[in-house]
Image: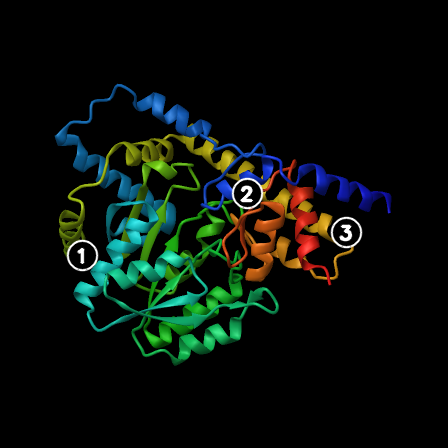
Amino acid sequence: MYYQLLRIQSLVSLRLSSLTKVLLSSILGAYRDDKGKPVILECVRRAAEKISGCEILESTKATTKSKFVQDCVKLAYGNHSNVVGEGRFAGVPALSGTGACRLFAEFQKRFYPDSQMFLPMPTWSNHHDIWRDSQVCTRTYRYYDPNSKGLQFQALMNDIKNAPGRSFFLLHPCAHNPTGVDPNYEQWKEISHIFKIKNHFPFFDMAYQGIASGDLERDATAIRIFLEDGHLLGCAQSFSKSMGLYGHRVGCVSIVSRDEKQATAIKSQLQQIVRAMYSSSPVHGPLLVSTILNDADLKALWEEEVKFMVDRLIRMRITLRRTLEELNSSASWEHITKQVGMFYFSGLSPEEVRQLQRDFHIYMTIDGRISMAGVTSTNVDYLASAIHEVTKE
């Protein structure tokens, strides 16, 4: 009883405080610290100091970008992957993950005009806009189960099996946005197997490498499985979240090819698409990323900082779940700690979301997606109490 009274006092005293504005400002997938402030990683600061004063001449821009693409491919596919060693990849720098997806969508439309892109239901809302604006027809496949708040694995497998052969599928390799629900290792193996049978083409949107588990290699497991099984595939990468370079728009799109000759041809076509869209990508962001990835000390520091970020997100998940359970909520909150990554897909109804906004000044997307980066040790009690109020029977 005393504990519940403390919760009520917290609810009243914090209701109109500035901490609720933190939730509003963290709807975007950018990491914030436990004070709700944006973070500049120390590895990025040191990389910026290391390259300061470097004059980027026209003659060095192509070399810088080529090196950046190779670094991205190694990070996604593995340093010792045959894809890298044999040069069986085509890639270009992109304007973050959005730009990478847009380039691939344009490539798909140009060379596979009758194809469709299968998107998971749900997925990041911008995926639909990207392929629509590229005039590529989209269809959906079942992914998330709103009842269990987990993966609809059998339904997903059935939709993959029933799709026309040689279809394009968009996959989230880790930290699925918006649900935070990922297949496990064995499930990825099964998905890869049926893709092989149907000859589907997988396109991975990897915006959160490292942010799911805190381990960069582990978060690339899905892609490594598909490569081991001999798939050709595409991959979009972003460093907005994992390096905190949201405003720099640093990304890469790459396509695994049959051989080096095909990779050269594909790269040429990607460059033509880039030329017509925005001519050339910036150099400073890719130079920062390459500097970090090629300096052993800076890369080790980056890995430590990624782990630190993920550990904080996990602590907030644990605390939010425990606090809701201590309030004797009638609902199950197990899914809070089962989900991973930047977001918590709460399962709150649109009306409950609107009530949180109206009565408690807590803001999130209408589908109930909460940025865990916006949950801090100072506002987690308030958030839990408010969610309890709008969900209790």
Q: Which residue is mark 3?
A: 327
The residue tagged 1 is 266
Residue at 86% x, 43% y: name it.
Answer: 2
**Along the line of sight, which residue is nearer the eye, 274 or 391?**
391
In this picture, residue 249 sits left or right of residue 273: right
Q: Which residue: 28% across, 39% down?
A: 68
Among the 4 quarters of the image, the one containing residue 105: bottom left
Q: Is residue 12 above or below residue 229?
A: above
Name the spot of residue 162 as percent of width and height, x first: 39, 80
Amino acid type, mark 3: Leu
Please state the horizontal and vertical placement of residue 342, each as a whole percent of the image: 51, 47
Q: Residues within 10 Å of mark 1 (few under 14, many from 20)?
A: many
Q: Earlier in the sequence, mark 3 or mark 2?
A: 2
Seen as rendered, the residue at the extreme front is: 358
Find out whether the residues at labels 1 and 3 contact each other: C-beta distance under 8 Å. no
Mark 2 residue element = helix
**Residue 208 or residue 178, whichever sits in front:** 178
Identify residue type, mark 1.
Answer: Ile
Q: Are marks 3 and 2 in contact (CB under 8 Å)?
A: no
- Name the residue beneath numbered marker 2: 23
Vertical relation: 147 (above or below) 62: below
Q: Amino acid at mark 2?
A: Leu
| Visible residue check, residue 79 | no
| Count of labels in the image | 3
Q: CA distance from mark 1 to mark 2?
A: 43 Å
Q: Which mark is residue 34?
A: none
User: Hey, which residue is sitting farthest top in the picture?
Assistant: 53
